[in-house]
Image (cartoon, helix red, strand yellow):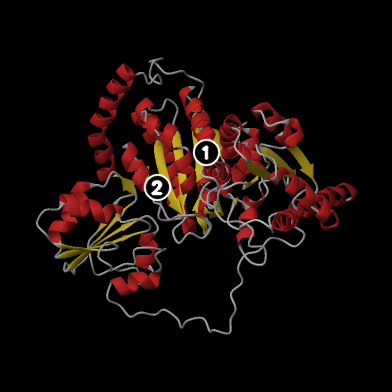
Amino acid sequence: MQKLLLLGDEAIAQGAIDAGLSGIYAYPGTPSTEITEYVQHSKEAQQKGIRCSWSTNEKTAMEAALGMSYAGKRAMVCMKHVGLNVAADPFINSAITGANGGMIIVSADDPSMHSSQNEQDSRFFGKFAMMPILEPSNQQEAYDMVHYGFELSEKYMIPVLMRITTRMAHSRAGVSRKSETRKQNEMKLPTDLRQFVLLPAIARRRYKGLLSNQELFEMESEKSVFNNYIDGADKKMGIITTGIAFNYLMENYPERVIPNPVLKIDQYPIPRKLVEKLYNECDELLILEEGYPLVEDMLKGFMANGKKIKGRLDGTVPRDGELNPNIVAVALGMTDTIGADVPGNVVSRPPALCTGCPHTDSYLALNEALIKLEPGRVFADIGCYTLGALKPLEAINTCVDMGASITMAKGAADAGLVPAVAVIGDSTFTHSGITGLIDAVNDKSPITVLILDNGTTAMTGGQNSAAQGRIESICRGIGVEEEHIRILKPLRKNHEENTQIMMEELAYNGVSVIIPRRECIVAIDKRVRAKAKIKAEDQA
């Protein structure tokens, strides 16, 4: 049995390869990106013909995975938690269509918002959709759960949500692979060819089937090897942990012996009988879960005799941010071992655009073009260029979600803020910006859209951009007037010319698109290094 040192993301990817995966679909987003990248770089995956290129956004990824499942093959779709919002329409409906080939949806949550706009907890989406949820507490479980998840999916013909968090995704541990890998499924269409046709009459019938399966899903949780009841002598308090929170609890007990009874929940729906056993045996409960207080809130709902339930809702555990061993220690009544505050003479280092980044020159020109106008009219988006909000540029005024720059600029222009400016990246434009631009063209909105084309999806590691070489033709096809699609090269020597172009388009009473185009400086470096490596290998 081979043992590998893997990130949590990599354990999921290797588990999928070994479990007979035929296709993985994703849009890059930290902390989920490495799952797809691992498959892309795997020679084994290449030999098996596993489909693993990037999708335009999470919705298209979800729908493509559902299509592969329809054809009877095992599929995985990966995204970060806010990406699940983008995929919500097919995600929720997939619980009603069901699956044919096994299908796992991986959503990587980001408590403490290390690289995200919010802390949302994907378990609520899974509960809302009423599909089974898996939440590994370590890398070995992440690997094993993929095999189990595909089997569970095919047993009940239902997609399965796997929820991980940043620390699980980006920490390493030894993982033992299964001695035998599974062959990919043969293509096999659904027995009922109307299964995926959600006309109301069919959808109502399938929804009743989903409801009737809830008891079976709970039964699977009750007997799951991933949900463990660990007895303890001190019944004054029982502890419920979920996912990676179990590790934070164990780190407070070096001998790995906890005096209190512990219920470790890694599979949902909540195993109610195990919860009731713990609840009935103990005077009070402490709930430790990474993310929102899902379990804690549910327990307050179905436990009726009023025992104290402590956790995030009552302040025993902070309501926001990640857990850590010290937070858990304080909740257990142990000594607070947190270190001293960082000295005031240690200056923080906020993120900044790379030296030589083309976005810097684009923002310098934009700032000068707007200098005579009232500030507060630049609507930006998700990408490296969001750093334009910080000093010294301070060039943008909003950043809400993928694609919101264009639609927010349109709405502000509708309200009378003219001119309004949208700043969006090439990858984000194809992800979620095109439809907003169509709205603006249809309404002849007086907005200027800067599509910053650095030729890559830079923020998440340099993945290929779906817009490569097609931005102008897309804009023309949407209906942007040819003379108001302007290409410029963001370099300091072109500053005056670029500023003049921007001023001209800001004065236009309609939709204009400016495309500052220069390759990402990091992408250039990677490309040069890759060529040098190939040359050295050839010479050797």
Q: Which mark is residue 58?
A: 1
Asked if residue 355 is positioned above or below residue 477 in the image, the reply reads below
Q: Nearer the viewer, residue 430 or 407?
A: 407
Q: Quadrant of residue 134?
A: top left
Q: Quadrant of residue 126?
A: top left
The picture places residue 531, in percent across and down from the top left corner, at 83, 48
Asked if residue 133 is positioned above or below residue 233 in the image, the reply reads above
Q: Is residue 131 visible?
A: no
Q: In the orientation shown, which residue stands out farthest toward the right?
A: 539
Give the amino acid at mark 2: Ser
Give the amino acid at mark 1: Glu
Q: Nearer the viewer, residue 168 or 352?
A: 352
**Residue occupying image coordinates x 74% and y 37%:** 485
Q: Which mark is residue 122?
A: 2
Residue 99 vs residue 480: left or right? left
The picture places residue 18, in percent across and down from the top left corner, at 52, 39
Mark 1 secondary-structure assignment? helix
Q: Nearer the viewer, residue 460 or 332?
A: 460
Image label count: 2
The picture places residue 514, in percent across and down from the top left corner, at 72, 43
From mark 1 to mark 2, how far is it between C-alphas? Answer: 14 Å
